[in-house]
Amino acid sequence: MLVETHHYTQLENIEYSPEIEKKYQDDAVWIITSSFIIFTMHSGFGLLESGSVSAKDEVNIMVKNVVDVVFGGLSYWAVGYGLSYGDYEPFRNSFVGFGRFFYDPTRYESEPHKEGWAYAAFLLQLSFSTTASTIVSGAVAERAKLKSYILLGCLVILVQALPAHWIWDTNGFFFHLGVIDFAGCSAIHMVGGVIGLVATIYLRPRRNRFNEDSIHQMSSPTNALLGTFLLWWGWFGINAGSVWAITGGRWRLGARASVATIMSSIGGGATSIVVSFLKTKKLQVNYLIDGILSSIVSITAICAIARPWHALIIGSVSSAISISVIPLLEKLHIDDPVGVIPIHLTSSMWGMTAVGLFAEEDRVIPVTRNQYGLIYSGSFRQLAIQLLCSLTIMVYSAVLGLAILAGLDKSPLGIRMTDYEEQIGADVIEHGLAGTNIARYNIEKPLNARTFQTVTKALAKWKIQTKRHARQRRQQRMQEVTEKRRELEKSGDETAQRTATLFLNENTDIGVANGSLPHSQRSTATKEIRQFPRTPRVSVISLTGDIDDASKDSHRQINTSVELPGSSSLQSGFLRSRGNSEAFARRAANETSVEVHVSLKLLSISFNR
């Protein structure tokens, strides 16, 4: 038989039989399926976060979600699982696990059915754990360097491992106190939310985020809403999978958790819609997203034992709290690009508190170990235990999170992007993706002659650096080609000499200086673009155009000269943005449309030496 604990299922030394194997098979299939569903949540997080940040950073935020799975999963397998569920007897204690590092179930389980179940259980725990680091990625969006974030994500996994031991392991001290947290309300969302809050304060707001003339908007509300749907779907895997089995009557708890999840989100979504109309006379997308997701977070602690009306109330209250937090963060100048604080932190605090109010024992399986909340027992004991757990985890996560951030900041890597890097965008700085979104990059303030001049200087500075590196690579390539040609010509063979000539022609056609055109497009590039590296160099760009400011119902002209930074000069085709197409490269040199918060059309661009 299986000995059920609050969250983690401990295996007894029982003899093998076909009936026992069938039981393990059914439960393992349930766990594995839930793990697959949970894994799709990373797609949801990626879409939500990329749709909430500026277009110049949306690729970078998706990459960070990949990093969470890759390096976060590696960190959990190597150390995190052992810190949570290690059971090496000489070092067993209620604070931290020890053993099962670099976990290999085959090594620890001698019987095949236990081994298979252990593999399934590890997969589900890993899926839970990597969610915590993904939460933090939203809080540091558009400000954290990628290399430092990789280390941060790995360390967040280890920070989360200890609360998991306290609450879910049979030897944990909060487990013995009777804390109820079925699906990670405190052990995952509270840890990630607190570290996210500390991180966003430590890294300071994004450039110009809270200026009087700043305008904050999503780069893609469609992607953000699609990400919300994927997260909504994935949470059924978290909450229903947290019952850990479907045999022995536990399928009832899975069904109950699923209903609680949908009822809570219904309450949260309805509340967010009503509040949004009352406050703004419109249905704000960020209110809707925060209301739905925060309501699901709040139900995770009690999902397996909540009644439908419990879930509706818990979700509605959570949604109202999260929406009320948004203007408070704005007032305090706390820059939370994706809503990590209202969705994960405040909702997890309310969710743990709600357990102390609404908890009741299941009538078939004693999953709460005969503990009841205030409404059903009249006692404050369970409420006090839940609040103590929340306070402990918040202080612990804040202290360790601050220590990690300070350590990374003092390291040679650093953690905060410079103003220049932030202005250009992480897609360019970290991944070299200039040009893929250049026409729709957001400048979070109204565009005028001064702000356009600033952005143009920044782009010019980056372009100069890019060309310098490209020139060095081109010279190195030419040297390699020349050496190869000489080797072929030394053979004296006429065929080899013709081959050398073809080889030289193919490899000297490198295209524009920064590799703007993909290799497949070089053969169709115009002669003008092919010769772009040899065009005259300039130090001043004159811009003339019209600005239509819809918000002020006005029309004014722009006529300005942009002097390139320092003594550097730039080749006259620098506006031919990289990566889009040959047609875009030709068009951008004489006519560019930039959609920001006002519409700018450059009627003429002249280059002065």
Image (cartoon, rainbow, N blue to C red):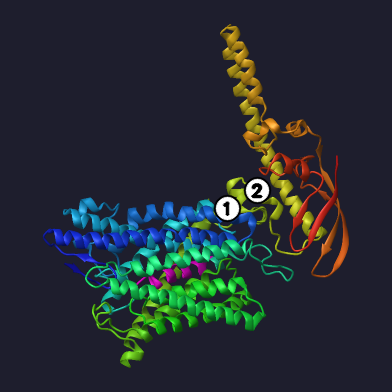
Judging by the rendered image, the residue that carries numbered circle 1 is: 59
Q: Position of residue 166 (x, y in %)?
A: 31, 70
Q: Where does residue 209 sit, x and y in percent of width and height?
A: 66, 66
Residue 140 shows in this picture: no
Rendered location of residue 370, percent (x, y): 25, 83
Residue type at mark 1: give it: Val
For disc 2, the marked residue is: 436
Does residue 362 appear to the left or right of 504 in the view shown? left
Query: Which quadrant is the N terminus positioned in?
Result: bottom left
Q: Secondary structure at mark 2?
A: loop
The reply to whether callout 1 and callout 2 are in contact (CB within 8 Å) is yes
Instruction: Specify which label sits upstream in the sequence, 1 or 2.
Output: 1
- At a point 40% along the width and 79% down the height, the residue shown is 352
- Asked whether residue 196 is drawn in magenta, I would say yes
Magenta stretch encompasses residue 114: no
Tell me where residue 397 appears, x and y as whole percent. 43, 69
In the image, the segment drawn in magenta is 182-199
Q: Residue at x 84, y 69 (%)?
A: 553
